Amino acid sequence: MIEEGKAKIFTVINKDYKGPGKKSAGFYNPTWHLDRDIQILFCRHIYQQGARKFLDGMAATGIRGIRIKKEISKDISIDINDVSKKSYEIILKNVKENGIEATILNEKFCNLVSRKKYDYIDLDPYGSPSPYIPCIFEGLKKKGFISISATDVATLSGVFKKTCMRRYLANPLKMQGAKEIGLRILLGYIARIAGIFDYSFKPMLSYHYAHYFRVYGSIEKGVKKAEKSLACVGQFYWENGWKIGKSLNAKKIAGPLWTGKLHDKNFIKILESSENKKIKEMAKKFMEEDAISLPYYESGKIAKEIKTRQPSLDKLIEKLRRHGWEAARTHFAGNAFKTNAGYDEIKSYF
Amino acid sequence: MIEEGKAKIFTVINKDYKGPGKKSAGFYNPTWHLDRDIQILFCRHIYQQGARKFLDGMAATGIRGIRIKKEISKDISIDINDVSKKSYEIILKNVKENGIEATILNEKFCNLVSRKKYDYIDLDPYGSPSPYIPCIFEGLKKKGFISISATDVATLSGVFKKTCMRRYLANPLKMQGAKEIGLRILLGYIARIAGIFDYSFKPMLSYHYAHYFRVYGSIEKGVKKAEKSLACVGQFYWENGWKIGKSLNAKKIAGPLWTGKLHDKNFIKILESSENKKIKEMAKKFMEEDAISLPYYESGKIAKEIKTRQPSLDKLIEKLRRHGWEAARTHFAGNAFKTNAGYDEIKSYF
């Protein structure tokens, strides 16, 4: 029995658990505690915008759905679904234990969302969310909200390039900036699939933590709106530093990917005022990093390249700013920074 | 009451019918007679390969499904589905009239294929098939067959470029070769979406007729196989004639699209031996055109460009061949031809 937020959860201790991609019924993953706290803040935010029908689409223990029902409001409806029979039974037990009202389902995700409509859908699969993303748009009203997990960070960050091409229809790069490129490929994929269904997509929070990517966003039906969000899908290339757009000669090209904002300021402000210290700290970086759309640089890799020591990140950012460049910390890594300065300038401040 | 093949069909005379994109219950479209005859040959072919469970997914009158059941074999099962209640009632009536056994359904296509599995799925929507294609792979066994109609030929052929980008994730071109590029964009889209679901895709017949594109193909599950079919997805560009691959400077680039074979020879041979004169005639061109993967040229447009008269197509092709080039007729247009000769060579034979 585990307690998290306002939920008490029975879970299965799985001795065979070997990593994020392993599938098992009723599995409770403590690494995700941070995200589930963020999710509650997100659900509270969209509740204020009118969301009432919520779906925890791949629920495992049911913890996300149970917490949403307990911690948001009594006047929301929550559907908690898992395709596994064993998980379904664990969810039944957990819902009873927590004394909440919920509709518990034992269906294939795509089957469920092709017959019911929601204001908010959470998609938290084992492994890649890619094959489930086209289904989502069948299950959302004209306006809606989504959250999506991706644990295939290695694939999206260029370790398995062919798999990324196949699963996300985009080219990753394995080099500095790789994780941001990976996350932006996921965002671009969501926006492109949304477009097929005449939906627009707008990220509200997109982040990397531990072994996962997590995206929160809003969607809205309409061809013009869809075209507007597709205008944010483009490419990054490396030509003595990161550039945006199409290059004629660059050998390192990533995309198609999301070149727009990763976060929505209004929601990040809510995270900033959270009592959770870790969330507060991340939110500061979310707010700062989003001024610069180009992928991050890694001071460790640059120092190695020019055979010098890593400067203090604070000082480096200060120097860049003093010379008129934009520069910012990023949540992606401790020794990473974002800037619109050229690569030669960056190196000259080391 | 209409008779086609072995089927008798009640249909709705729709006074408001204005074109291929117009949706109406129980609509019978005589333009498609040719394709339905081809479909029977296709179904007979895949029956011999073991296909038994057939789905007419967006049936309107039910004519495709009824003909399949009547003209293939008694030991197949056929599901006939339409989301419209009115169409559903027309199908009930037509199935009864034809005295066949069939399961008649009134479901959303994606809902149906997310819960039932078939050997063969026919997808014949009003307008673009693009949003339904991701669903198909939920409804097929490990190996299966599909046929897909697209009536948005103008979009795929570059008249509505933005819509093509949004719906098929590919860039079309409005110029000579446009229809082949459009059809190949559709094929490439199917292969790319198949890849997301770990499926390979192989076209068996891909053609343009009247106001529609139509694709028949096989699919099979497996990552290696999927990667192999994705290797056939690439680009065409125009640089003094059609070229395949990536160009650094070309302004006219089409794709991603299918650069492989449009047809399967074994199936085309069956079409060639058909008693239907029109099908026989088209099949000859299908067989001939598939030796050259580059898009077709139009002799009318070239003649206009170099201010001369159009040569006889037979003589032009003969000349090209005599000079060692591959050259062929194509089903796409009467004054179109395919060749691997450069554009200057082509023009010199006018």
Image: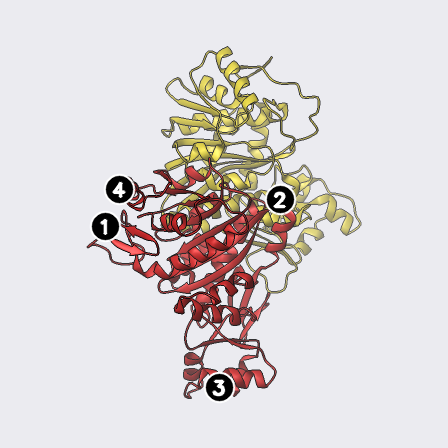
Chain colours: A yellow, B red
Amino acid at circle 4: Lys
Both marks 3 and 1 on one chain: yes
Which residue matches tag 4? B86
3D distance between C-alphas at marks 3 and 4: 54 Å
**Residue at 57% in and 70% down:** B291
Kindly identify which numbered label has been placed on residue A284. none
Both marks 4 and 1 on one chain: yes
Nearer to us: label 3 or label 1: 1
Q: Position of residue A150 (x, y in %)?
A: 58, 37
Query: Circle 4: is it few (<14), some (14-19), or many (20+) Cα within 10 Å?
Result: some
**Residue at 53% in and 21% down:** A63
Which residue matches tag 3? B315
3D distance between C-alphas at marks 1 and 2: 51 Å
Q: Residue furthest right?
A: A307
Q: Earlier in the sequence, mark 3 or mark 1?
A: 1
User: Height in image: A34 above or below B291?
Assistant: above
3D distance between C-alphas at marks 4 and 1: 10 Å
3D distance between C-alphas at marks 3 and 1: 48 Å
**Residue at 38% in and 32% down:** A117
Which residue matches tag 1? B12
- Looking at the picture, tell me which residue is in the foreground, B245 or A206: B245
Amino acid at circle 2: Leu
